Amino acid sequence: MDLSRFPRRIYTPGPTPLHALPRFSAALAATCPEGRAPDIWIKRDDLLGLSPGGNKTRKLEFLMADALVQGADTIVTCGAPQSNHCRITLAAAIHEGLKCRFIIEERVPGSYSEAASGNNFLFHLFGVEHIEVAPAGADLEAASARTVEDLKAEGRKAYAIPVGGSNALGGLGYVACAQELQQQMFDLGVRFDALIVGSGSSGTHGGLVAGFLGNNIDVPIIGVGVSRDPEDQAPVVLKETHAVLDLLRLRMTPPAGAVECIGGYWRPKYSVPNAGMVEAVQMLARTEAILLDPVYTGKAMAGLIGLARAGRWKAGERVLFLHTGGAPALFAYEDVLLGRVPVVA
Ligand SMILES: *Cc1c(COP(=O)(O)O)cnc(C)c1O
């Protein structure tokens, strides 16, 4: 698929590493029935650019390029109090010499604290221009549009990026990732029996589904919902997939089953810890020295562990985990991750 007609900024020097996790796979097998588990591999999108990067880096390559084409001097975006998306968008804005403002939605009431660590600390270290705090369920698109209007009245030109950067243009970042992965599979001579990815605002999952379809990559993608069960998440992902295919002018219809989601692992609530997340974060840290995050990749890896224990794959099959970043949020969850405070099962 030719993405070259879309303006793009380049925030990462080359492909992100793709490698096996032998110690993690062995530790996982030891906890599976009959000691059998698939071989787990990882694609390190936690090593993307924009210090420290993550999946939002790929989306922002296209979104920031569009903002620059439109002559923006300010970026407005929105997210949760520990938003990786807001932090990486701010980093991209700084890199491009633009200002950046956030609308932060307090999805868990009372959860916003100006003094919080993790990403919130980085918002301030990076020098965010302004943060507006909105209550849970607020219309963030409307709040962004108001900020864009207010700045216009001051003679500035703001560009609004939606939650998670998940519109059609942002989704192109994960079409590009699909193509990068396809080339790596070819170069390494490796095939995968499944790809596991966290599924939230869905630009990542939906962009990958579009990219796999368009490039004929026949590997099932399983999205682990980080805030919704499949009946609510799959339609969001399918809508993103269609938006990306339309933008690419590809007249393709995703076949039934192209969007597979699994639920449960996000509970009790988006961003609220559970025991499976803590186990997953500790296990990858202690076997491979790779940091997951408590909100997305910890829960997505808990989903992979759960499916492996339920016998979804045979020994010798290969499962690829897409690491989407997020490690700074670990520092807002230290007590939970070291078992100093209890979490729900
Ligand atoms: C935003 C985010 C996700 C979810 O990606 P979406 O494209 O919003 O579905 C997963 N992992 C991390 C670390 C994130 O910051």
Image (cartoon, rainbow, N blue to C red):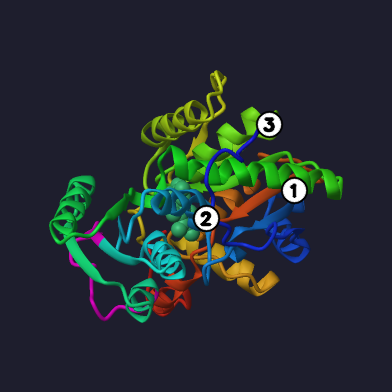
Horizontal and vertical percent position of residue 184: 77, 49
> What are the residue bounds of the magenta stretch?
103-118
Q: Please identify, in this view, whether the residue under mark 1 or under mark 2 is nearer the observer.
A: 2
**Mark 2 residue CB less than 8 A from any atom of ligand 1:** yes
Please state if 246 lies on the left or on the right of 304 as rendered. Answer: left
For the residue with label 3, is its CB less than 8 Å from the closest atom of ligand 1?
no
Circle nearer the N terminus (1, 3): 1
Label 2 SS: helix
Q: Nearer the viewer, residue 229 or 245?
A: 245
Residue 285 lies in quadrant: bottom right
Identify the residue under disc 2: 55
Tell me the amino acid under the disc marked 2: Asn
Is residue 160 magenta-colored?
Answer: no
Task: Classify mark 3: residues with Cα within 10 Å, few (<14), some (14-19) or many (20+).
Answer: some
Please state which amino acid type lies under the numbered disc 3.
Asn
Q: Which mark is residue 38?
A: 1
Residue 169, given in percent of the width and then of the height, sits at 46, 41
Disc 3: which residue? 215
Q: Confirm or reject: label 1 Cβ below 8 Å from ligand 1.
A: no
User: Which of the marked residues, 1 or 2, is nearer the chain's N terminus?
Assistant: 1
Q: Residue flagged by tag 1: what amino acid is it?
A: Pro
